[in-house]
Image (cartoon, rainbow, N blue to C red):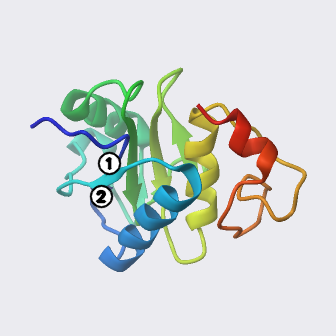
Amino acid sequence: MPVSAQILLVPVVPLPPRALIEATADRLTAVLFREVAIVDPMVPPSSAGVVDGLIDPGPVHTALGASWGCGCRTRLVGVTAARLLGDSKVTRDGCTATLLVHLEEGEIGEVVRAVGRTLGLDACRDQECAMHPGTDARVLCPGCRSRIW
């Protein structure tokens, strides 16, 4: 299935609420100026070992890549309600732009920053910028906006 979006949000079982996934897509579009598509949910491979709301991200990254490609041209962002093994909120697969994110209320800013890093942005000192750690800002500062690729 050809997809023209620049960012694919792939819901991964256990799923975050649909409204939260849609709000994340809207925020990514508004902040990073990229077309975002939400695709059908993915059931993680059994090797991901989803137990008690905890998931091993490695097999999920492999499944995302097998389904949608490496993520270099279209950013692949798996979003799940599961906690990620290793206590991280976001895991990245090597040098590619395939991310797996633990998504819950109040964490959309973290997703925006994670995807922003795949587009060449770093943490920003401007507290009004969406790339400032811990902020819920909904815009990039002029400096970050000029560096996005």
| Residue toward you, 7 or 83 | 7
| Mark closer to the observer (1, 2) | 2
Considering every residue shown, the one lying at the far left of the view is 1
143 shown above or below 23: above
Q: Dividing the picture into quarters, in which one does residue 62 lie?
A: top left
Q: Is residue 100 visible?
A: yes
Question: 61 or 116: which is nearer to us?
Answer: 116
Please identify the quadrant where the C terminus is shown.
Answer: top right
Q: Position of residue 50 (x, y in %)?
A: 33, 55
In percent of the image, x 58 and y 34: which residue is there? 119
* Residue under pointer 2: 11
Assess disc 1: are there few (<14), some (14-19) or many (≥20) residues with their C-alpha within 10 Å of its C-alpha.
Answer: some
What's the amino acid at mark 2? Pro
Q: How many angstroms separate mark 1 from mark 2 (CA)?
A: 17 Å
Mark 2 element type = strand
> Which residue is at 64% across, 50% downward?
113
Q: Is residue 26 left or right of residue 65?
A: right
First reached walking from the N terminus: tag 1 or tag 2: 2
Looking at the image, residue 115 lies above or below residue 107: above
Give the labeled residue for mark 1: 49
Q: How many marks?
A: 2
Regarding mark 1 in the picture, which secondary structure is present there? Answer: loop
Bin the neighbour count of mark 2 within 10 Å (Cα to Cα): few under 14, some 14-19, many 20 and up: many
Q: Amino acid under label 1?
A: Gly
> Label 2 near label 1: C-beta < 8 Å?
no
Q: Residue furthest right?
A: 125
Q: Residue at x 88, y 56 (%)?
A: 126
**Residue at the extreme top:** 95
Please identify the quarter of the rendering in which residue 60 is found.
top left
Query: Which corner quadrant holds the N terminus?
Result: top left
Residue at 64%, 36% in the rendered image = 148
